[in-house]
Image (cartoon, rainbow, N blue to C red):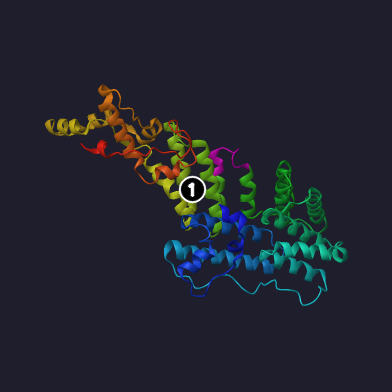
C-alpha cells in the first residue's frame, strides 16, 4: 500500500470532527489518497501503527493517548462499516508543541521526545536527541528514549538511511537500560524492532526467551508479537488453540484480533491454496472457521475473512457438469428417481473443478459437448464473487501467473 510508506500524515492523525461526515472518517483512514477499496487495509494499517506506539509507550500519558486513538479508530471503523454513530475521536490534550524553555529535568526531556514521536514528528525528535545528548546522555531514561527515537525514525522516515553504528548504539543502549532500569515489555519490543531494522533478526528469539524469564506475566498483545515470529513453524492445532486462548484473555482487544486473523489467513493462503485434496479442504474449513470466530466484532477483520468463509463453505459442494437437458429428460421419465444417480455421476466438488480449470480448445468437434460441459461447470464455480479474491495470491495449475483469470464470452455455454 503506497500511502502507508510514503505519506504518514493520515496515520498520525489522532482524531476527527466531533460530528464527523463520512468524508471526515474516510480521510481519517487515508481515503484519499488511497482509493476507497483500500479502506479495510488502511484501517488495519492505522490500528497496527498505533498499537505499536502503545506497546512501546514509556508514560501513562502516552498509554492513555494511544488508547484514545485506538478507540477513535474503532469508532470510525464502526461508523463507516456498520453504520454506527461516531461522535468524535482521539484526545487532543497530548500535544508536543514547541518547548517554551529548555528542559529542566530528564523527565521533561523524555516526555517531550515521546510527545514528538506520538505526533509523527520524527525528524524533530532526532534533532532534539542530538541537541540534548551532551547534557543528558548519561541518564538511563535518556538512553532509553534515544533508542526509541532512532527506531521510530528508521521505521517511519522513508528514504532515510541510518549509519549501522547508530543502530548498534541504539541496540546496546536498550540492552543497557534493561539492566539499569529493569525489564519491561515496552523495552523488549523496542529491542526486537531495532534488531529487525538492523538485519539481526536471528537474535530476536533470544530476546523473547529472556523476556519470558524476567517478566512475571506477559500480556496477550506481547505474546502475539512473539507468536508472529513462530507462526509458520508451529503445527496448526496447537497454534489455533493458542490464538483462541489469547482472544479469551483479551476479548475486547480489536488490534489483537485483527493481527491474529491476518497471521492465520496469510499462512492458510500460502500453505493450503489452491485446494488440492479433501484433506486440505477439511483443514481449510477448520482454520477459516477459527479465523472467523476471532474476527467477530472487528468489522475490517470480518470483511477480510468473509470471502474465505464463503469459499470454505462451498469448496466441497458438488457442481453438476453433465448435459442439463438429458438430466431433466431422464429425471422426468424416471419420475425423478434417477436424479441422485445422475447428479452424483456427473458432479465434482467445487475445489476440484477450480483446480482443473477451463478448457476453451473447441477444435475437436467430437469433444465439443464434453468441453462445453466442463467449461460450464467451471464458470458455475468462478462466477461467485468470492473465488477470485481468495485466490489472488495463489497460482492455480492452469494459470500463467497468480490472479490471471480468462476473459471469455460465456453466453453460449448457458444456452441450455
Q: Residue furthest bottom?
A: 100
- Residue 96 relative to residue 241: left or right: right
Answer yes or no: is residue 195 visible: yes
Q: Residue at x 33, y 31 (%)?
A: 348
Q: Residue at x 26, y 23 (%)?
A: 365
- From the top left corner, tell me how far across and down residue 255 is, in percent: 56, 57
Does 76 lie within the magenta span? no
- Residue 139 relative to residue 318: left or right: right
- From the top left corner, tell me how far across and down residue 360 is, in percent: 34, 30
Answer yes or no: is residue 250 visible: no
314 is higher (above) or lower (below) than 93:
above
Which quadrant, please, contains the C terminus?
A: top left
Q: Which residues are magenta?
A: 230-240
Report which quarter residue 126 is drawn in: bottom right
154 is higher (above) or lower (below) than 76:
above
Report which quarter residue 186 is drawn in: bottom right
Q: Nearer the viewer, residue 63 or 391?
A: 391
Q: Residue furthest front?
A: 363
- From the top left corner, tell me how far across and down residue 250 is, in percent: 57, 57
Q: Residue at x 48, y 46 (%)?
A: 290
Does 232 lie within the magenta span? yes
Q: Residues within 10 Å of mark 1 (few under 14, many from 20)?
A: many
Secondary-structure class at tag 1: helix
Total numbered badges shown on the rendered structure: 1
Q: Nearer the viewer, residue 147 or 331?
A: 147
- Residue 383 relative to residue 173: left or right: left
Q: Nearer the viewer, residue 209 or 101?
A: 101
Which residue is under mark 1?
291
- From the top left corner, tell me how far across and down residue 151 is, in percent: 72, 55
Amino acid at each position: 500500500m503506497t500511502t502507508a510508506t510514503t505519506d504518514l500524515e493520515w496515520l498520525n492523525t489522532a482524531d476527527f470532527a466531533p460530528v464527523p461526515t463520512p468524508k471526515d472518517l474516510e480521510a481519517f483512514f487515508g481515503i484519499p489518497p488511497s482509493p476507497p477499496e483500500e479502506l479495510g487495509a488502511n484501517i488495519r494499517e492505522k490500528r497496527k501503527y498505533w498499537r505499536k506506539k502503545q506497546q512501546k509507550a514509556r508514560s501513562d500519558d502516552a498509554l492513555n493517548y494511544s488508547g484514545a486513538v485506538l478507540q477513535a479508530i474503532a469508532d470510525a471503523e464502526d461508523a463507516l462499516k456498520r453504520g454506527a454513530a461516531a461522535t468524535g475521536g482521539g484526545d487532543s490534550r497530548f500535544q508536543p508543541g514547541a518547548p517554551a524553555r529548555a528542559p529542566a529535568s530528564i523527565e521533561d526531556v523524555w516526555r517531550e521526545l515521546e510527545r514528538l514521536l506520538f505526533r509523527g514528528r520524527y525528524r524533530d525528535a532526532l534533532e532534539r536527541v542530538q541537541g540534548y545528548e551532551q547534557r543528558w546522555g548519561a541518564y538511563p531514561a535518556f538512553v532509553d528514549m534515544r533508542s526509541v527515537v532512532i527506531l521510530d525514525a528508521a521505521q517511519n522516515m522513508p528514504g532515510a538511511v541510518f549509519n549501522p553504528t547508530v543502530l548498534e548504539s541504539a541496540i546496546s543502549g536498550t540492552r543497557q537500560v534493561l539492566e539499569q532500569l529493569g525489564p519491561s515489555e515496552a523495552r523488549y519490543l523496542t529491542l526486537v524492532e531495532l534488531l529487525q531494522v538492523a538485519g539481526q533478526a536471528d537474535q530476536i528469539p533470544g530476546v523473547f526467551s529472556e523476556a519470558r524469564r524476567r517478566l512475571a506475566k506477559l500480556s496477550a498483545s506481547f505474546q502475539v508479537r512473539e507468536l508472529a515470529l513462530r507462526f509458520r513453524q508451529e503445527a496448526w492445532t496447537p497454534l489455533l488453540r493458542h490464538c483462541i486462548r489469547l482472544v479469551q484473555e483479551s476479548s475486547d482487544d480489536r488490534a489483537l484480533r485483527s493481527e491474529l486473523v491476518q497471521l492465520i489467513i496469510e499462512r492458510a493462503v500460502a500453505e493450503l491454496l489452491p485446494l488440492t485434496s479433501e484433506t486440505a479442504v477439511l483443514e481449510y474449513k477448520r482454520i477459516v472457521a477459527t479465523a472467523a470466530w476471532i474476527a467477530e466484532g472487528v468489522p475490517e477483520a470480518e470483511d477480510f475473512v468473509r470471502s474465505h468463509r464463503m469459499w470454505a463453505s462451498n469448496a466441497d459442494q458438488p457442481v453438476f457438469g453433465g448435459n442439463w437437458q438429458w438430466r431433466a429428460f431422464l429425471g422426468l421419465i424416471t419420475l425423478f428417481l434417477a436424479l441422485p444417480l445422475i447428479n452424483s455421476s456427473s458432479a465434482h466438488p467445487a475445489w476440484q473443478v477450480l483446480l482443473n480449470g477451463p478448457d476453451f480448445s473447441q477444435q475437436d468437434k467430437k469433444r465439443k459437448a464434453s468441453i462445453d460441459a466442463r467449461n460450464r461447470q467451471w464458470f458455475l464455480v468462478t462466477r461467485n464473487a468470492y473465488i477470485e479474491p481468495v485466490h489472488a495470491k495463489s497460482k492455480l495449475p492452469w494459470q500463467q501467473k497468480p490472479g490471471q483469470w480468462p476473459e471469455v464470452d460465456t453466453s453460449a455455454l448457458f444456452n441450455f
